[in-house]
Image: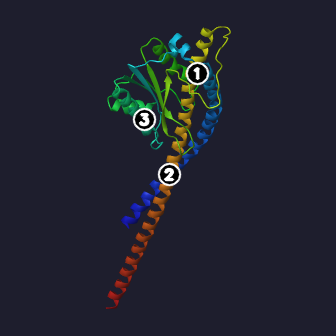
Amino acid sequence: MQKARLVRRRIRAVRKTRDITHTMEMVAASKLRRAQERVVAARPYAAKLAEVMARLFTPELAERYPILRQPVRPRRAAVLLLTSNRGLAGAFNANLIREAQAAMAEHRAAGVETELHVAGRKGVAAFRFRRIPLALARSDIGDRPALADARSLADPLMLRFETGELDAVDVVFAHFKSPVSTPAVRMRILPVTPAREKGVGRAIHYLFEPSADEILARVVPLYVRNTIYRALVENAASEQGARRTAMKNATDNAEDMIERLTRTLNKARQAEITQQLAEIVGGAEALKG
């Protein structure tokens, strides 16, 4: 009887856990749909801006403007890691942290002094637990990032790059391919070296109006800020996709556990009934004797 009571108690506890994980799965699915819409909306603008930069960028301009300088031998680099503020998302944050550590290890192996900037409570906690110093620790960016968030991250890094304090800046984030595929990736945002896509040509001569200085003063910072903004929205969508997958797996596991415990309970009840019948029969035989 004691065993059956314990199994019933455990079934009730697992059912409560299943209800919680199922609710979290539904919430994550709802947030994922909106996050996907932001990703889809951000990608065309980012692609067109990258195309403009690819057409505009020349080695001559890179020599004239500090924001476009191309250091031959970087001395100091920064790694910007984007993580989530909440857990229960499977290996989402662990993969991002691992990728950031790999980026730092590569820089240091090349003799480049590296500093770490982290946006996201989980990343901040992980590196503080490891007692790794952070140049920036932020946890105020939610799951609906805005352009102002990207600006607040990008502008200090651009200023330090222009003054020569930094020679390279990498951003580590989760690339949203699908709700079940969110690999951690690393992207170089400074120095600005836009990839030239196939079919994208560039004229040899340009007439700048009002002036090259004013155009570059607007386009280049916009390109860097938009790159970080896209990384933020991709990361937010990837977080919700990973959380939905993790909570679905947890719910399925709870269902399997309830099924196994129910079978165990039925066996325990059957054993109790058999024992009680045996005791009744034994008592009846004893009264006959």
Q: Secondary structure at mark 2?
A: helix
Q: CA distance from mark 1 to mark 2?
A: 39 Å
* Residue depth check, mark 1 versus mark 2: number of the one nearer the observer: 1
Q: Residues within 10 Å of mark 3 (few under 14, many from 20)?
A: many
CA–CA distance between discs 2 and 3?
Answer: 24 Å
Q: With respect to residue 2, does 51 lie above or below?
A: above
- Which residue is at 46% across, 56% downward? 12
Judging by the rendered image, the residue that carries numbered circle 2 is 249
Q: Amino acid at mark 2?
A: Asn
* Picture coordinates of residue 137, whole percent (x, y): 42, 24
Q: Report whether residue 222 is seen.
A: yes
Q: Tag 3, which secondary structure?
A: helix
Mark 1, secondary structure of its residue: helix
Residue, disc 1:
223
Q: How many marks?
A: 3
> Mark 2 vs mark 3: which is more N-terminal?
3
Residue behind mark 3? 99
**Outermost residue, front side:** 204
Is residue 178 or residue 50 the one in the foreground? 50
In percent of width and height, residue 127 lies at 37, 31
Q: Which mark is residue 170?
A: none
Q: Tell me residue 128's x, y (percent).
A: 35, 29
| The N terminus, quarter of image | bottom left
Q: Nearer the viewer, residue 17 or 226?
A: 226
Identity of the residue drawn at 42% across and 35% down: 99
